[in-house]
Image (cartoon, helix red, strand yellow):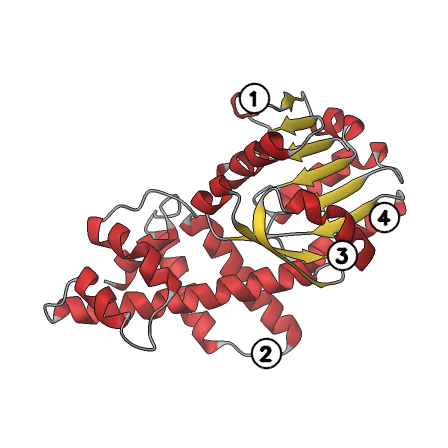
Amino acid sequence: MKIGMIGLGIMGEAMCQNIAAKHGDTVYCYDIVPEKRNIPGAVPCESSVDLARQADVIISMVPKAEHAWAVYREILPVLDASKICIDMSTIEPQESRKISGLVEERGARFADAPVVKSRPAAEAGKLGIYVGCAEDLYETILPILSYMGENVIRMGENGAGLVMKICHNALVSQIQNGVNETATLAAANGIDILTFAQAISYGGGQNFYLDSKKQAIADENFKTAFSIENMNKDVHICLKLAEESGVRMPGEENAVRVYETAMEKGLGAEDFSATIKVVR
């Protein structure tokens, strides 16, 4: 079974490297930036259509819904019943369902499979992956997803994987904002971030975000593993989904304000942990 990967950014590059290293058949790759197509063990393609024509399984990992639409509109004419499409981008669930409908009209199968965790986990093949698709398709694609992640779970039909991803990132944004506020209060009273994190670990406030980001915050090292710009997109998707679902999320509304301020301050390209600069 030949696999193709479209989108070789911060996450897609590492994911494609794992597929190429672990898959026993041909792996194709494509990115709109030619310099990014140099993935060891993968065959570079000149276009998304070129890749989709040759691959049995087409995986996409692009930033926004507009990019996902561009990919699937472009490859739609070469899709048929022999193709499986897996979109691992984080986009609005309703947009993914629309794309799924178009793909399935061509006879192809479609799954949304967004990922959690950041670049280091992508490099290690230890991503979490939330899948939305029919159960029989999930069983077919699970070995492929396992090249990239060690925790893969089917959430339901098309769009369900994305709903879970948005809920996950919204929770992370609120945990992060709680860390930002309380760490800033502690610092104002003479407690540094590493001592703060150690003390938090003794009680019920311990959390993965603080454990994984404490040293970076202490060092003011905001090298991007997951950008403020990408998280800003996700928290806005959350509020849109909440509105459509008739759910009020005042905590998330506050997190969104922090992200909007970070974007206004020109921090979009920095790691999402740089939001502490806004709270400070």
Counting residues from the N terminus, which is met first, the one under dot 2 or under dot 3?
A: 3
In this view, the residue in front, 22 or 247, is 22
Gap in angstroms between the C-alphas marked 4 and 2: 31 Å
Residue bearing the label numbered 2: 247
Counting residues from the N terminus, which is met first, the one under dot 2 or under dot 1?
A: 1
In the image, taking residue 180 as reference, residue 33 lies left or right, namely right
In this view, the residue in front, 206 or 87, is 206
Counting residues from the N terminus, which is met first, the one under dot 1 or under dot 4?
A: 1
Judge depth for marks 2 and 1 and give the one in front.
1
Kind of residue at badge 1: Pro
Kind of residue at badge 2: Val
Could you classify mark 4 by the number of other residues whose Cα lies within 10 Å: few (under 14), some (14-19), or many (20 or more)? some
Kind of residue at badge 4: Glu
User: Residue 34: which numbered mark, if any?
Assistant: 1
Gap in angstroms between the C-alphas marked 2 and 3: 25 Å
Judge depth for marks 4 and 2 and give the one in front.
4
Q: Residue at x 68, y 43 (%)?
A: 144
User: Residue 104: which numbered mark, if any?
Assistant: 4
Gap in angstroms between the C-alphas marked 1 and 4: 30 Å
Residue bearing the label numbered 3: 133
